[in-house]
Image: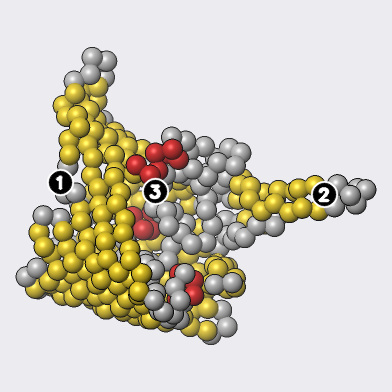
Amino acid sequence: MKKLLLATSILAATTGYAAAEISLTGDARMGVVYDGEDVQFSERARVRFNMSGQTDTGLEFGATFRADQASASAGGSSFGTSTDKDGTTWISGSFGKLEMGDVVSAAEEALGDLTAIGYSGLGDFTDIPYINGDGADTIDQGPGALYSYTMGGFEFHAGMTDGSRQFGLTETVEGEDDTNPIAITYANDRDTAYSLAAAYSGANYKVGIGYLDNGNVENNGLSGYGGSQVIVSGEVDVAGIGLKGYYTEFHEVIVEVGDYDVEVESSFGLSADYTFGATQVIGFARNDELVGDNNLESYGVGAIYDLGGGASLRGGILTSDNIIDKDFQGQTVADIGIRLNF
């Protein structure tokens, strides 16, 4: 990825700092999305600030945030009503790497996601459903911490949040004299959420396992859920063909599907991709099993053509029973466009 260097090799006079660097990266896209009924134009451009440095003793440190997250990344306290967690700050050394802020779970750091399809992601159904960490669909635990350590082909990760109290739903009720209404704001007291994961990578394969736990949520009028999850995954790449699959089971995990709260029992998925020259074709299938033997099936195909220089043409088509949860108008959606990395 090309970088616009704003400052490089800035020697600080302060004892303990060797050098610091600030750079800009970014991405943009434009194209069209078929939402099941109509074709819509789609465009986005983002800039990311990347800061890094190293002490005289070899300790590395840094931070990153997007320009549109600049205000939120300035704070990450779990006190009061703050849920700001945009941006990430980290330190690393022989002890491993510690990150805080908008971090993924230990399981997602170790296992990742299926191969994405489409120009826009088409609802991100190729994302593996982790119950905590950045992007989780269950409950927002606020800022998190992630520790990672690698040794040869092995990697170990541990993640957690601080179990913040967050305020949300406000309900107006009648006062004592039935004339002056008063507003009551409910709060959720949340247990610490944590995750553990380990993985091993060989020459052309990787296997991993993870455990995630959201504890309990004292639910006072807000939509929030605890629960736990165990997940295993494996992937292999041979002669330009990549395969990746996962299987996960949930315990007392409730998510929102459209206007309904449902309990999810298990999920499994598989993606396959084949690269020849500058072209990559991708297919995926996923099944989410709800308590009560109801299944939500999702599958799709896509293609990528690398134009070089950070630009690529992408497109895909996807069908899902769960599409109502993704703000589309129909169960079959599609897109095509160009993506740019700077």
Q: Position of residue 101 (x, y in %)?
A: 42, 42
Q: Position of residue 230 (x, y in %)?
A: 44, 66
Mark found first going from the N terminus, 3 or 1 = 1
Choose between 11 and 202: the one closer to the eye: 11
Picture mark count: 3
Identify whether 61 is placed above or below 44.
above
Choose between 127 and 216: the one closer to the eye: 127
Secondary structure of the residue carrying numbered label 3: loop
At 48% from the left and 62% from the top, the residue drawn is 137
- Do residues under tags 3 and 1 come within 8 Å of each other at their CB atoms? no
Label 3 to label 2: alpha-carbon separation: 41 Å
Secondary structure of the residue carrying numbered label 1: loop
Label 3 to label 1: alpha-carbon separation: 24 Å
Mark found first going from the N terminus, 1 or 2 = 1
Mark in front: 3 vs 1: 1
Determine which residue is flagged by label 1.
2
Determine which residue is flagged by label 3.
103
Determine which residue is flagged by label 2.
181
Identify whether 36 is placed above or below 211.
below
Q: How crowded is mark 1: few (under 14 residues within 10 Å), some or many (20 or more)?
A: few
At 22% from the left and 60% from the top, the residue drawn is 339
At 36% from the left and 69% from the top, the residue drawn is 40
Identify whether 342 is placed above or below 251.
above
Indicate the quadrant where residue 335 lies. bottom left
The amino acid type found where label 2 is placed reads Pro
